[in-house]
Amino acid sequence: MGKSLFQKVWDAHAVRVLPNGQTQLFIGMHLIHEVTSPQAFAMLRELNIKVAFPERTFATVDHIIPTEGTDRKRPLADPMAEEMYSAIEKNTKEHGITFFNPETERQGVVHIVGPEQGVTQPGTTIACGDSHTATHGAFGAIAFGIGTSQVRDVLATQTMSIAPFKVRKVEVTGKLKPGVYAKDVILYIISKLGVNGGLGYAYEFCGDVIKDMSMEGRMTVCNMAIEGGARVGYINPDEKTYEYLKGKPYAPKDWDKAVAYWNSMKSDADAVYDDVVTFKGEDIEPMVTWGITPEHAIGISQAIPAVSNEVMQEALEYTGFAAGEKMDGKKVDVVFIGSCTNGRIEDFREAAKYAKGRKVAAGVRALAVPGSYGVKKQAEVEGLDKIFVEAGFEWREPGCSMCLAMNPDKLIGREISASTSNRNFKGRQGSSTGRTLLVSPVMAVAAAVTGTITDARKVFEIGG
Amino acid sequence: MSLGPITKVTGRAVPVPGDDIDTDRIIPARFLKCVVFDALGGQLFYDERFDADGKSIGHPIDKEQYVGASIIVSDDNFGCGSSREHAPQAIKRAGFNAVIAGSFAEIFFGNCTTLGIVCATADKATRSAIMKAVEANPKAEMTIDVDRKVVKFDGKEYAVDIKPNSRKAFLEGSYDSLAGLLDGLDAVKAFEKTLQYSFK
Ligand code: SF4
C-alpha cells in the first residue's frame, strides 16, 4: 500500500514517540516573526537555554512594521511596535539567527519571504508561530502554525511534541473559467467543507485545477487551509515547484540530489487517504464573503443564504446584510490588495492588468501592499507601481498591513473593505465594527474602480 | 519544569455561550504588541466587554455574579482563528484554568494544554444543562475531575471528554512539553545528521 507525501515526510522527521504518546517531530525549517517570538526567547533566557540549531531558523519583521515609507524610520512611532522590532533584532543577533530585515532588502510577510529565499523546500517540515504557515505546503512541505510555547520548544530543540494528522485528499478537477482564481477556489472549498471541516486533517490539494496553477496560486490555496480548519495543506511538488526554487538564494547546491529526494517524497499513486472529496473547477465562480468567517462565502451571482444557525444570524447582525441579498452592488469604502494570501508578484500583475488606465472610484481608499521586498522590487521593475499610483492606489512598503491592522493601516468605524487577505473575523482590520469582504485581487480591483462589489468579469469583459 | 499533575480543576464557572468564538475576539489583535504576556488578562474579550469609552457592556465575565470565576463554559469551535498563544495566555492570566466547550480549534487546544488549561468537550445537551445549572446557582463551585472525565456541580455529575493525550499529560504533570524534548537532545543532534537537507 502506498503512502501520501504527508506520511513520508512525517516518517522522515519523527525522532521518537514521547511518553505522552505524541511524536517528537524534527522541524527542518523554522520561521519566526516579531509578534510570536519574543516571549519564546524570554522563556529560553529564563531557563538559560541556547537555540539548538540557529541555522534552521529564519526571521523577519512583518506584522507591526508600518508600510508607509516615512513611518519606517527607527525608532518606530508606536513604542510597543518598536519594542517588538528591537526584541527580534536583539534575539536573532544573540542567537546567531539569520534576520531578513529591511536593510537586507529581504524583509516581507514571513510566508512570502520563505519561498522567495528558497528556504521553503519540498519534503521538509516547517513550523512558524503563525497560523498561515501551511502556505509553504504549496511546495510539498508539511508546514503548520504553532503557539509560542512550541516556538520555544523548537528554538530549544528543533523538535516539538505533536500528534499526526489524518489526510484528506481534496481534488479539484477540470478547468477554471476565465476570471476565476486560486482565491476563489479556496473560498469555494471552505464554503463547502466549512470552517471546521478540516479539524484534525492535513489537506492534500490535487487535481487538474491545482496542477495548472502557478506556484503563486498554489500558495494562495494552501495559505487558507487553516481557514477551513486544516492546520496543514500541501500540494505534491512537480517541475513548476523545482523551476520556482531554482536560483533562489537558499536553493540546494547539490540540485540533482535534492530533486531526487523531492521526487521520492511525492504521494504514491496508490496512497491511502482517510477521506477524499472532489470538486469541479467549472462550478466555481468569483467568490465574496458576506459574514464573519471565511465559510460565509458565496459566488458573485448568488444570494446570501437563509439563516440556518446562530453564527449566520450573528454574522448578519454584524455586517448589516440580509439573507436573500446579493453582494453584487454592495458599496465599499476601502480596498486592500496584499497579505500572505494575495501579496505576491502574480497577484499584482493580474491586478495591474485591470487597474491600468482606470481610476479608483471617488470616496474609496485603495491600498496595494506588496508582500515582500522581492515582490516590491519586481513589481517596480515591471512598472506595476506606476499603474497602481496612476489609478489612485497607494503603493506601499512590504508588510502585513491591513490584513490584521497591527500597524497604522486600519479600517475606521463601520467601513467596508474588499480585501484580498484571508480573514473576515469581527474587528480583524482594526475597527471593532469594521467589515471585511474577502475577494481575489481582480475582484478587489473591480471593487476599487466601481466602488462596489461586482463581477469583475463583467467590468473588465473577461472571458467575453 | 515540574509543574505538577493536574487531576482536577475547581472553581466557579461562567457561561460564555456562542459558537466560533475566535482568537480575535478572545484577544483583539491590537493587544498583541507585547513582548511579555503579563498585561493580557485584563484585555480578555476586550471588544465584547467594553464600549469605546471603556465602559462595561455587560459581558458575562464582568457580571457581578460571575466575577472571580475560573472555568469558562462555551460552545462549538472555541478558539478558532489565529495560532497566537496570546489567547490562552489571556484566558489564563484572567484567572481561568479550564474551558468546557463543544469543540476546540486545534492549535488553541494544544496551546492551552501546554499552559495547563484543561479543555473539556461536552455535547450540546450537556453544555446547556451545565450552563443552566450555573445560571441558577452562579456562586456554587464546580469541579472538573480530569481522571474520571466528569464535571461535578451542585450535586450533579455531567460526563465530558478530555482528549486522551492531554488528559494523560495533565495527570502525569507532563503537559509542558519542553522537559521531555530536552531529554533527548543528543538523540536529536544525531537525528539531524540523517536529514536530507540543510541551510548551511
Ligand atoms: S499577511 Fe495577514 S495572515 Fe499573513 S502573516 Fe501577515 S497578518 Fe498573518
Image (tube, coloured by chain):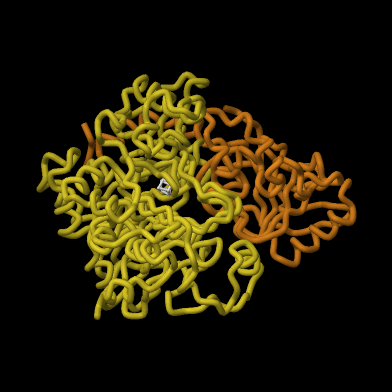
Which residue appears farthest toward the front when viewing the image?
A: A362
Q: Which chain shows up in yellow?
A: A
Residue B122: image quadrant is bottom right
Give above or below for A239 relative to A148.
below
Give how far across and how far down residue A36 sits, in percent. 47, 36
- Total labels: the figure holds 0
Q: Position of residue A116 (x, y in %)?
A: 24, 44
Residue A279 falls in image quadrant = bottom left
For residue A267, above or below residue A70: below
Q: Is residue A154 visible?
A: yes
Q: Is residue A445 left or right of residue B48?
A: left
| Residue at the spot 56% in from the left edge and 49% down from the top edge | A431
Q: Is residue A92 left or right of residue B126?
A: left
The correct choice, above or below, for B13 with respect to A167 in the image is above
Kindly identify the residue that appears in the image at 44 percent across and 54 percent down.
Answer: A231
Q: Is residue A35 left or right of residue A394?
A: right
Quarter that holds the N terminus of chain A? bottom left
The residue positioned 34% from the left and 62% from the top of the image is A445
Q: Nearer the viewer, residue A190 or A419?
A: A419
Q: Quadrant of the C terminus of chain A?
A: bottom left
Residue B181 placement (x, y as % from top left): 45, 34
Q: Is residue A10 visible?
A: no
Point out residue A380 in the picture as x, y percentages from the top left corner. 20, 46
Colour in which chain B is drawn: orange
Viewer-closest of A398 and A385? A385
Residue drawn at (54%, 31%) of the image:
B34
Q: Nearer the viewer, residue B198 or A190?
A: A190
Left or right? Give the position of A366 relative to B73.
left
